[in-house]
Each structure stands twice: as C-alpha cells, then as structure tokens.
Image (spheres, rainbow, N blue to C red):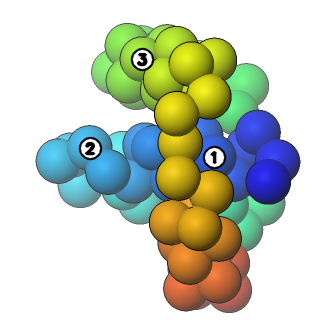
Amino acid sequence: MDRISCLAYLLFQVDHEALKEAALQLVSGDISILELKANQDFLPFIKEAEDVLKQNTLNKNEVYEFVEKYLYVF
C-alpha cells in the first residue's frame, strides 16, 4: 500500500470533519500532502500520522478497504 493512501486512512480516523474531508481529497488525488502540510491546523495531525506510519503497525487490509470505499467519492 502506498504512503499517501496510508496517511489518508490515518487522517480520516481523526475526529475532525475538515481533516476527514481533506483525507478524502488526498486519497482521490484532488490535493497533495504538501498542500495539506501548508495548513497549520492539519500539520500536527499529519506529523502524528507519519509517525504511526513509520512504526509499520498499520493494518493494510483496513487501508485497502478505506481506499476502495472512498477513492472515487469526489
């Protein structure tokens, strides 16, 4: 699974509606991770998601299901 899909999945798990919307845009390719990082409100969440991703403890099947469900939302 690619890094962007995993980050989008992790960001979508946060209880923050604007971040969930951004995660959906990220997984569909409508926004880049660099554009998201430019938003100071999202930056702490992105850094935390990147730390989780580095630990390699992510359930890849859950990421696959997330991408399959939300890839073509927009």
Q: Earlier in the sequence, mark 3 or mark 1?
A: 1
Q: 27 left or right of 46?
A: right
Q: Secondary structure at mark 2?
A: loop
In the picture, residue 11 is in which quadrant? top left
Q: Earlier in the sequence, mark 2 or mark 1?
A: 1
Q: Quadrant of the N terminus?
A: bottom right
Residue contact at pointers 3 and 2, CB within 8 angstroms: no
Residue 37 drawn at (x, y percent): 59, 20
> Regarding mark 3 in the picture, which secondary structure is present there?
helix
**Picture residue at 52% right of the left edge, 33% below the top:** 57
Per the image, label 1 sits on a secondary structure element best described as helix
At 63% from the left edge and 18% from the top edge, which residue is drawn? 54
Local crowd at mark 2 within 10 Å, few (<14), some, or many (≥20)?
some
> Please, what is the three-letter code of the amino acid marked with disc 1?
Cys
The residue identified by callout 2 is 14
Label 1 belongs to which residue?
Answer: 6
Q: Which residue is mark 3?
A: 48
Q: Which label's residue is closer to the chain start, 3 or 2?
A: 2
Q: Which mark is residue 15?
A: none
